[in-house]
Image (cartoon, rainbow, N blue to C red):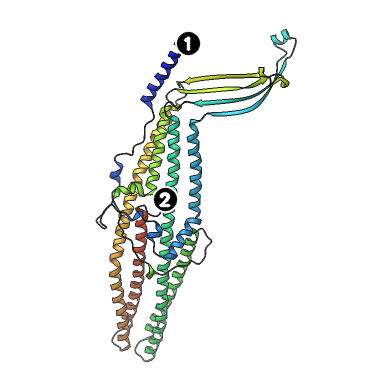
């Protein structure tokens, strides 16, 4: 009889294992079509297997002052510190998921008191109300067998969520580095524009004195004097606007550094050099380099594991529970050997009717998985677009600089020649005013183009996944 029972248990266990092999949780595989989403135009910069995204930001940026600001921002920025707390929270959930294989154990004392009613047949038989006290000190152990991979899938999902927060932290880090560098370059470009505006004010102040002298000599009219003075006032107004923009950008950079608004130490525009070979690598590298793309894939993995968990809920759950301790109605005899008790229960429960909760959970999990897949693909499309945009902007700015330098030189020469001709009575004041205004605008545009090149370089570095190393 005993052998027969052992055979029954063995066959039952073998049956469970065979069923489990059919319905075990699936392993995640990266969708085969996602690589087709990672494409960007490469007719601007030659495509190769090397990517400057692998360079750390310390190697990529050459300005020591900028590197100091970036390090301070990474240490103090509030967004980064908040992202670190997200990592800590997700890590706690991951550890909880890993502990899902372990049993639960509760231990504690219990006291109960009961008093029966007097209006019952039992009370009449026993002679009245009966009361009883019971003392108990027990432990309860419960464990669920992971037959269908439910616990394993939950742990995998928690791990994916943790890794998603790690990648999100990297994405915040790259964004902060990009924002600090862009704001820094904007500041030094504004400094250059302010210096240009100040030189223009000094120059036009001298020019106003010359025009007044020409007016006294009868060579020009009061209109010329007024127009020249108006240009001087306009240049002073430009200085005020630029100074305001400088203060605003200093405030922005201060916040990025995690500090109160203050003056920012910085270099100058002419010191900035692009010493890195801007090789972008092959499009597929975006899958591994871009933190936001990797975060989107980890979200997809977490959704995939949620589907596994939802599927496992359709099958029986095997739980083992054990309770043991000491129990008695007399506290003085509670710790007697006769007070010991124990019971063990094995339970296999198959859900039948549960108000459609399990099916709803699976349908929701499948919908969320599809959403995560679409979000993953969208992140790749956006990454590819950002790389292409940054490539063309960088190349356009690089090509424009030499043209803007020529334009500025021609307008500057025209301004000088027109003033000389005016002094000799061979040009009118309108030609001089036009030449001056064109020269100032050309110089400002040249400075903007230099900033656009630096900004596009930073954006290209971020878009290919650089900065978090």
**Residue 421: assigned label:** none
Q: Is residue 379 left or right of residue 145?
A: left
Location of residue 243 with respect to 35 vertically, above or below: below
Q: Is residue 277 left or right of residue 328?
A: left
* Closer mark to the observer between disc 1 and disc 2: 1
Earlier residue among tags 1 and 2: 1
Location of residue 125 with respect to 182 vertically, above or below: above
Location of residue 370 with respect to 459 vertically, above or below: above
Quadrant of the rendered structure where residue 276 is? bottom left
> Looking at the picture, how far across and down is residue 307, in whole percent?
40, 32
The structure residue drawn at horizontal position 27% and vertical position 57%, both measured from the top left corner, is 45
Q: Which of the two residues, 261 or 87, is positioned nearer the viewer here?
A: 87
> Looking at the picture, how far across and down is residue 240, in whole percent?
46, 72
**Residue 2: assigned label:** 1
> Looking at the picture, how far across and down is residue 242, in whole percent?
44, 69
> Looking at the picture, how far across and down is residue 199, in whole percent?
40, 78
Give the number of marks: 2
Q: Seen from this angle, which residue lies furthest left?
A: 43
Location of residue 214 with respect to 119 vertically, above or below: below
Quadrant of the rendered structure where residue 427 is? bottom left
- How far separated are the C-alphas under marks 1 and 2? 63 Å
The structure residue drawn at horizontal position 36% and vertical position 40%, both measured from the top left corner, is 373
**Residue 171: assigned label:** 2
Per the image, label 2 sits on a secondary structure element best described as helix
For label 2, count other residues whose C-alpha is less than 10 Å away and answer few (under 14), some (14-19) or many (20+).
many
Per the image, label 1 sits on a secondary structure element best described as helix
């Amino acid at each position: 009889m005993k052998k027969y029972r052992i055979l029954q248990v063995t066959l039952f266990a073998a049956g469970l294992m065979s069923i489990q092999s059919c319905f075990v949780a699936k392993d995640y595989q990266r969708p085969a079509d996602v690589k087709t989403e990672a494409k960007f135009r490469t007719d601007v910069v030659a495509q190769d297997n090397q990517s400057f995204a692998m360079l750390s930001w310390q190697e990529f940026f050459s300005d020591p002052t900028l590197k100091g600001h970036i390090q301070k921002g990474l240490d103090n920025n509030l967004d980064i510190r908040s992202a670190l707390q997200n990592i800590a929270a997700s890590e706690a959930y991951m550890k909880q998921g890993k502990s899902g294989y372990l049993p639960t154990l509760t231990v504690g004392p219990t006291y109960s008191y009961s008093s029966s009613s007097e209006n019952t047949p039992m009370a009449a038989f026993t002679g009245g109300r009966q009361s009883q006290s019971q003392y108990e000190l027990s432990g309860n152990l419960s464990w669920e067998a992971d037959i269908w991979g439910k616990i394993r899938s939950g742990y995998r999902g928690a791990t994916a969520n943790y890794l998603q927060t790690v990648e999100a932290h990297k994405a915040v880090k790259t964004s902060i580095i990009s924002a600090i560098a862009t704001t820094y370059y904007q500041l030094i470009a504004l400094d250059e524009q302010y210096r240009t505006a100040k030189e223009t004010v000094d120059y036009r102040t001298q020019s106003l004195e010359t025009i007044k002298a020409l007016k006294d000599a009868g060579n020009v009219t009061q209109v010329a004097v007024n127009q020249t003075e108006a240009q001087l006032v306009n240049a002073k107004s430009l200085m005020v606007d630029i100074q305001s923009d400088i203060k605003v950008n200093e405030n922005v950079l201060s916040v990025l550094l995690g500090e109160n608004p203050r003056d920012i130490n910085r270099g100058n525009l002419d010191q900035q050099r692009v010493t890195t070979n801007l090789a972008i690598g092959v499009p597929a590298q975006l899958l591994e380099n871009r933190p936001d793309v990797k975060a989107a894939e980890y979200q997809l993995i977490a959704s995939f594991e949620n589907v596994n968990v939802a599927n496992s809920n359709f099958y029986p759950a095997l739980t083992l529970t054990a309770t043991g301790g000491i129990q008695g109605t007399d506290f003085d005899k509670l710790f007697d050997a006769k007070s010991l008790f124990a019971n063990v229960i094995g339970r296999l429960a198959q859900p039948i009717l549960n108000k459609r909760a399990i099916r709803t959970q699976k349908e929701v999990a499948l919908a969320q998985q599809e959403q995560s897949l679409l979000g993953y693909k969208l992140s790749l499309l956006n990454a590819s677009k950002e790389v292409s945009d940054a490539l063309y902007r960088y190349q356009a700015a690089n090509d424009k600089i030499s043209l803007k330098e020529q334009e500025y030189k021609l307008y500057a020469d025209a301004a000088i020649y027109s003033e000389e001709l005016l002094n000799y009575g061979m040009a009118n004041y309108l030609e001089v005013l036009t030449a001056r205004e064109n020269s100032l605008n050309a110089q400002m545009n040249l400075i903007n183009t230099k900033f656009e090149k630096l900004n596009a370089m930073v954006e290209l570095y971020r878009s290919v996944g650089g900065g978090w190393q």
